[in-house]
Image: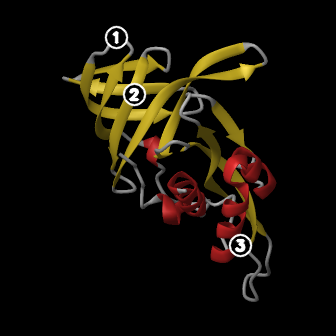
Amino acid sequence: MRYLFIFLLTIGTLGLSAQTFSSDVFHQGFMVTTEKDTIKGDLKYDLDANILTVVYKGKTKSFSSHKVFYFEIFDSILNNYRQFYSIPYTVNIDYKIPVFFELVYEGKLSLMAREHIVSQTVNSSSAYWGGGNSTRLVIQYTFYFMNNKGEISYYSGRKKDLLTLMIKKQSAVKKFIKDNKLDTDEMADLVRITSFYNSI
């Protein structure tokens, strides 16, 4: 089964100033612990800290990524289902820790992401207000690919690196990107590219 989140086709790195982010609030959902227990309740995630907070039967409890196998939420901000896995990932040369990844597209080659809220400076020049710069918060995504062996590769966003990751079908993927005028650092287009790669 493949999971394609429509909201990801439009959100990208759009400015979301004066808006609540998904990571700011609780969402209905459930989690599966590493001990295979399923807990339903209201969930709030923190990807930077790899912490999942759950409100269950009036009690609030936090779980680190070491204690979580999987969680799913119905995102009340984006009005869509989202799925996350805790997967060991190398943070140093020889050191792995469980890290939360969002599953964006599942297949022989799966696309995953981690979101970050960052400050962005924008030019707010105006003939009426005299111009100047302003700062806003935006969501940016870091992308990863996982093969059918469970090996995770960081993706830089560059076309050259994407073609290297898809080297077995590089020529066909390159043509598909060119023919469809796709951007290799945009989530919506990456979903299309990954889907195409898995289909050939």
Residue at the bottom extreme?
127
- Is 20 above or below relative to 83? below
Residue designated by label 3: 178
Residue at image point 77% right, 79% down: 125
Give the distance between the C-alpha atoms of the residues marked 2 and 3, in whole angstroms: 36 Å
Nearer the observer, 186 or 166: 166
Percent position of residue 173, x then y: 67, 61
Percent position of residue 10, x then y: 51, 66
Residue at image point 58% right, 55% down: 197
Percent position of residue 198, x then y: 53, 51
Q: Residues within 10 Å of mark 1 (few under 14, many from 20)?
A: few
Residue designated by label 2: 70
- Is 129 above or below relative to 87? below
Nearer the observer, 62 or 96: 96
Quadrant housing the C terminus: bottom right
Residue at the top extreme?
35
Q: Residues within 10 Å of mark 2 (few under 14, many from 20)?
A: many
Residue at the left extreme?
57
Percent position of residue 95, x then y: 71, 13
Q: Is residue 16 visible?
A: no
Q: Residues within 10 Å of mark 3 (few under 14, many from 20)?
A: few
Quadrant housing the N terminus: top left
Which kind of residue does numbered mark 1 sit on? Answer: Glu
Asked if the residues shown at circle 2 and circle 1 are in contact, with their CB atoms under 8 angstroms apart, the answer is no
Residue designated by label 1: 35
Indicate which label's residue lies in the foreground, 1 or 3.
3
Which kind of residue does numbered mark 2 sit on? Answer: Tyr
Whichever of callouts 1 and 3 sits on the residue coming sooner in the sequence is 1
Residue at image point 73% right, 61% down: 171
Could you tell me which secondary element the residue under label 3 belongs to? Answer: helix
